[in-house]
Amino acid sequence: MLNQLTVTNYAIAERVELQFRKGMTALTGETGAGKSIVLDALGLAMGDRADAGAVRHGAKRADITASFDISAIPEARQWLDSHQLDDQGDKNDCILRRTISKDGRSKAFINGQPCPLSQLKELGGLLMDIHSQHQHQSLLRKETHRKLLDEFGGLQPLADSTRAAWKSWNSSRQRLEQRRHNADEAEARLQLLRYQVEELDRLALNEGEQEALEQEQAQLSQADAVLHCSHQAALLCTEDDTSAAALVRQALQQLEQLPVEIPALADTLQMLTEAQIQISEAGDNLRRFVDDYEADPVRLAEVEDRLSAIYQMARKHRISPEELPELHRRLSQELAELDGGEGSLEQLDAELAERLSQYQTLAGELSEKRALAALELDQRVGRELAQLSMPNMQFVTHLGQNREGEPAPHGLEDIEFLVSANPGQPARPLAKVASGGELSRISLAIQVVVAQTSTTPTLVFDEVDVGIGGGTAEVVGRLLRSLGENGQVLCVTHLPQVAAQCHQHLFVSKFTEKDATYSRIEILDNQGRISEVARMLGGVDMTEHTLAHAREMFVKGQATHH
């Protein structure tokens, strides 16, 4: 629901701040006073195109802010959450803002955060619907027809389920088409994968095996050098008179022959004794190693053959040997998917058929319920049109089959509102039959019928009373007020019969000061409303008779709905 509208330096309005409440609000005033300022400003706050001419003369920019209460609009709250624009302190508040500079550039904001104009328009469509003879004629769009019918029949959850089923079906269809389109390439890929995986299966390379083989090959290929060096080391340790063990023994003998005991050399004697023991043990270990060590040319050949196979396979795939196990896993997985797995033609065919069946079940149920809802909608809109002095206007909700019977996200049928202006004439689309004034009244009739289920809480009607008068005008007023009982209605009107029945009355006037023209909008109290209705009845000169008539209309208009 629209709570507040603030307009600064727009057109001839220097600053206007309006508070709105639930119910029906009428905007009246003399021609040229600026009634369009409110509706045009709301349109800009909802993403309409702007131009530099919108900025008040002498000002740098125009600034328009519309504040909404979205506590009863879950779609808007979800939209804000999905776009991460719900950082307000109160989650039930939503503020749309638009600034327009004098060079024609504009900026858009949602809850204080800059946003593209497209987002402002998208969110605005969830908050308010403006019905005029020129702009926001949503009733001419088939998407609106489908939305209104589904809301009227309470079919939105089923329609959402149908759309989700269509998305699943379409995703499977695209995958299958792509798979068939690439069938020859896929078969060639399948054959290559089979050959490559079979080769890698035969190689059967384990993690870390190549590194272990390289270490073993290094040892086996240098067996003679290992034996020679180990044998020489054993000789140097213990085997002859010049060995390390013999030299250490001689050093000990020299120290043991000292004529007196020297305490400072006690540690040195200990170290030489330990060195003699360790050298002897090292020599024993080397002799055992040389005795047990055998060169194995057969094993060396096996290791070198295995490594050669590994290196050759790595070169073939242009990767390092260490990457072969991971390549084996990856190719095996791809082969499994293509060869009878979830990417196979057979499985994709079965999946597509299953998802099509799910879609057709939901869409068929939706079609049956839409047909019933359409009959009820046509009858109820027809009754409202008769009240609006359009008794010959036939309203038809046409459910036509989709082109070529293809599944569509919105269901099995195209939905379009048609009208026949005179008996015997075929029903045709609204845009080709209805005039601007008729379109406004048809829109009003439909909105009255679907108001109980509509998800758009604020409805704006610009001059829905064009071309009507008398008793019909009073009916229009009653219908607008009844719409306001269930939500919020703003209407620009020239008819006193309509204005007398509103819950809130805004009077628009203009005045000149210091060669500048200003627009003023004020909320009228009961006495002010009676005076304005009298002005609408009798023009500039108001008589007692006119005032009495206005008072009677006002009292009647307010009493009728209590």
Image (cartoon, grey):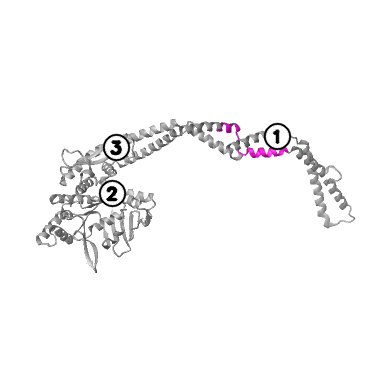
Q: Is residue 189 above or below residue 535?
A: above
Q: Which residue is depicted at the point 24% across and 64% down?
A: 518
Q: Residue furthest left?
A: 545
Instruction: Tell me the magenta residue range.
Output: 196-221
Q: Secondary structure at mark 1?
A: helix
For mark 3, what is the residue?
Answer: 413
Q: Earlier in the sequence, mark 1 or mark 3?
A: 1
For mark 2, what is the residue?
Answer: 456
Main SS of residues in magenta:
helix
Q: Is 366 or 426 nearer to us in this picture?
A: 426
Q: Position of residue 543 (x, y in %)?
A: 10, 62
Q: Position of residue 410 (x, y in %)?
A: 32, 40
Q: Is residue 331 magenta?
A: no
Q: Position of residue 541 (x, y in %)?
A: 12, 62
Q: Earlier in the sequence, mark 1 or mark 2?
A: 1
For mark 1, what is the residue?
Answer: 300
Q: Residue furthest right?
A: 259
Q: Position of residue 71 (x, y in %)?
A: 31, 52
Does the rendering let one see residue 72?
A: no
Q: Residue furthest bottom?
A: 514
Q: Amino acid at mark 3?
A: Glu
